[in-house]
Amino acid sequence: MAHTDVLTGIHNRRFFEQQAHDALENHSIQKEACALLIFDIDHFKRINDSFGHAAGDQALRRVAEVCRQSLHADDLFGRIGGEEFAIFLAHTDALEAMQIADRLRQNVELCRVVLTDQTQLFLTISIGVTVLRATNNRLSQLMSSADQALYRAKSNGRNCVALVNESVAD
């Protein structure tokens, strides 16, 4: 329970960051590429305001479920805040990370949340991607880069994927 987000059943922020930090350190030692994706549900506040927090909770659970089904068992996936999620992908270069991110985006776009009154919510996500290729074990820097990419995706109209220039160690 201490490692799990109660609402979605995926890793919580603290556990995600601990595991991602350890994985990043390992990749730095082995000098392997890895990627970090940060995404959130587009117009989530509108869902809560229009349909209530129970509908927002359903949307969060559905997105977590769709993503969990779309990822590999060894991919690290967690909810890091409100409607914000993160994924750490080991042994993943920029091209693979963008393909995975776009597959996630498409899978979420295809899913529906059906409310008790049979109203259907159509969901989309915006995803920021960054990749590390050298020796740097600062998770905060990688998360900041992915967050910048997320803001770029949102400014590009939402329901899209954006890549920040690959992070290279100092």
Image (cartoon, rainbow, N blue to C red):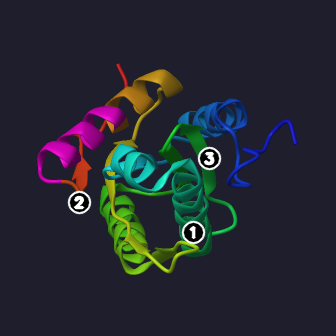
Residue depicted at x 35% and y 73%:
109
Three-letter code for the amino acid on which mark 3 is drawn: Gly
Residue named by callout 1: 71
Q: Quadrant of residue 158?
A: bottom left
Q: Nearer the viewer, residue 143 or 69?
A: 69
Q: Give the vertical position of 50 relative to 95 (above or below).
A: above
Closest to the camera, between mark 2 and mark 1, is 2
Which callout, 1 or 3, points at the residue further toward the start of the chain? 1
Q: CA distance from mark 2 to mark 1?
A: 18 Å
Local crowd size for mark 2, using a 10 Å CA cut-off: few (<14), some (14–19), many (≥20)? many
Residue corresponding to mark 2 = 160
Q: Which residue is denoted by mark 3 in the rendering?
A: 78
**Magenta span of residues:** 147-157
Q: Secondary structure at mark 2?
A: loop
- Residue 55 position, x and y percent, is 53, 58
Give the residue type that dot 2 points to. Cys
Q: Indicate the position of residue 97 as horizontal and vertical percent values.
A: 38, 59
Q: Is residue 41 left or right of residue 83?
A: left
